[in-house]
Image: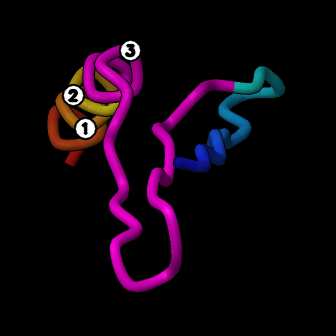
């Protein structure tokens, strides 16, 4: 099985978003990292609060 980690930049810092895992492109799956879901949840609450 192969694994590719996916990161994004938020405010100048790299954050792990998740990983793509699989043997080939037909069975590849994306899995969100717990740390990203926490960051995304906090940021979305801040965005909606400001609207």
**Does 31 appear above or below 42?**
below
Residue matched to label 1: 44
Secondary element under disc 1, as helix, strand or loop, is: helix
Label 2 sits on residue: 41
Which residue is more in the foreground, 49 or 40? 40
Tell me if mark 3 has few (under 14), some (14-19) or many (20+) residues whose alpha carbon lies within 10 angstroms of its own: few
The residue wearing badge 3 is 35
31 and 7: which is toward the camera:
31
Q: Are marks 1 and 2 in contact (CB under 8 Å)?
A: yes
Q: Whole-percent x and y of residue 13?
A: 77, 21
17 in the magenta segment: yes
The stretch in magenta equals 15-39
Query: Residue at left 65%, top 47%?
Result: 4
Q: Residue 30: x, y in percent?
A: 36, 56
What residue is shown at x 52% (from left), y 48% (from top)? Answer: 1
What's the distance in space between the residues labelled 1 and 2, CA to CA?
5 Å
Relative image position of residue 25 (x, y in whole percent): 50, 81
Q: Residue at x 32, y 32 (%)?
A: 40
Q: Nearer the viewer, residue 42 or 5?
A: 5
Mark 1 or mark 2, which is nearer to you? 2
| Mark 2 Cα shell of 10 Å, populated few (<14), some (14-19), many (≥20) | few
Q: Position of residue 11 (x, y in %)?
A: 72, 28
Q: Is residue 35 magenta?
A: yes
How much space separates mark 2 and mark 3, taking CA atoms?
Answer: 10 Å
């Amino acid at each position: 099985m192969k694994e590719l980690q996916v990161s994004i930049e938020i405010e100048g810092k790299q954050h792990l978003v998740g990983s793509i895992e699989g043997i080939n492109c037909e069975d590849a799956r994306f899995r969100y990292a717990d740390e990203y879901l926490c960051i995304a949840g906090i940021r979305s609450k801040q965005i909606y609060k400001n609207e």
